Image (cartoon, grey):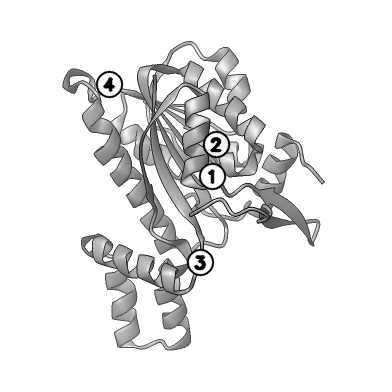
Amino acid sequence: MKYTNLELIKLFGDYNISMSDDLSFSHEDPREGELESYLDMKLVKRWGMPLFEKSRITDISILDVGAGTGRMTKHLCKIAGKCVAIEPYLPFFNRLKSSCFQTNVEVHHCALKEYTEMATQPFDLVFISAVLMYLDNEEAIDSLQHIHKLLRPKGLLYIRDYGVEHDAAGDPPFGSVVRDGEEVYCPQILRPPEGIREMARRTGFSYLKWRRSYPIYPMRAPQVINDRWPNIATELLLRTSYSRLLFPVWGMFAAMNLQYRKIKFNYFSYLLQKD
């Protein structure tokens, strides 16, 4: 069964309606959400900010697509002169509106296509996280074309999406959500980096950079350990593993753990530039 975009938005929203404003999914540990937000902002600053003229560095405009409850909007607005967040799922939008009240933030209850038709200014940077994975190739390309229209010349697109290392023939999309108390199949398209590269080429973007995010499941290991064997040693491991000072070390450990467990899907981050 193929769901429409609006049906997928509702399925995802209903399943994650209880998530806190700092998380991207309802089942995440708060420390995991903090890690994800920190890494996203670190890459946005490290990859994107040096590409803007120094005279405009404090006045850039940012669009957060599928902003959810504002997990990244409240961080992105700190580096922007103006930050616009769009969210089509009404319960999430209501929380977004109440949590992101900064004077340089503008929020809209709409999907990307609707916003493209009403936008009055181009953006320097568009941020989109965990959205393309719910779209088939035609829909994803259509979304990238809308984003291309919204960007200034040489504007940047930061994508964070669930994907796979390599495109394996025969591997079906996967995923499920709970609807009316029953698990419902909800396909997710897990694309490899070369798949995103090809879509970028077809929609008028240059493919600048990509990298794996810190693996999700290995990052949960300290919490699992602490739940099962709560003592001072494991609590210390839990706290220091999530310390920002040890992110590089923890990232290498998580990556090795990922390979050892043969987990082939992960979050990937990409930076594209409008040609």
Q: Give the CA separation, mark 3 to mark 1.
A: 19 Å
- Kindly identify which residue carries mark 1: 130
Q: Quadrant of the C terminus?
A: top left
**In the picture provided, is 102 more to the left or to the right than 87?**
left
Frontmost of labels 3 and 2 is 3
Q: Give the CA separation, mark 3 to mark 2.
A: 27 Å
For the point 43% across and 25% down, the residue is 205
Q: Earlier in the sequence, mark 4 or mark 2?
A: 4
- Kindly identify which residue carries mark 3: 263
Q: Earlier in the sequence, mark 3 or mark 2?
A: 2
Q: Which dot marks residue 66?
A: 2
Q: Give the CA separation, mark 1 to mark 4.
A: 27 Å
The kind of residue tagged 1 is: Ala
Q: Earlier in the sequence, mark 4 or mark 3?
A: 4
Residue 141 image position (x, y, % from top left): 59, 29
Frontmost of labels 1 and 4 is 1
For the point 65% across and 46% down, the residue is 13
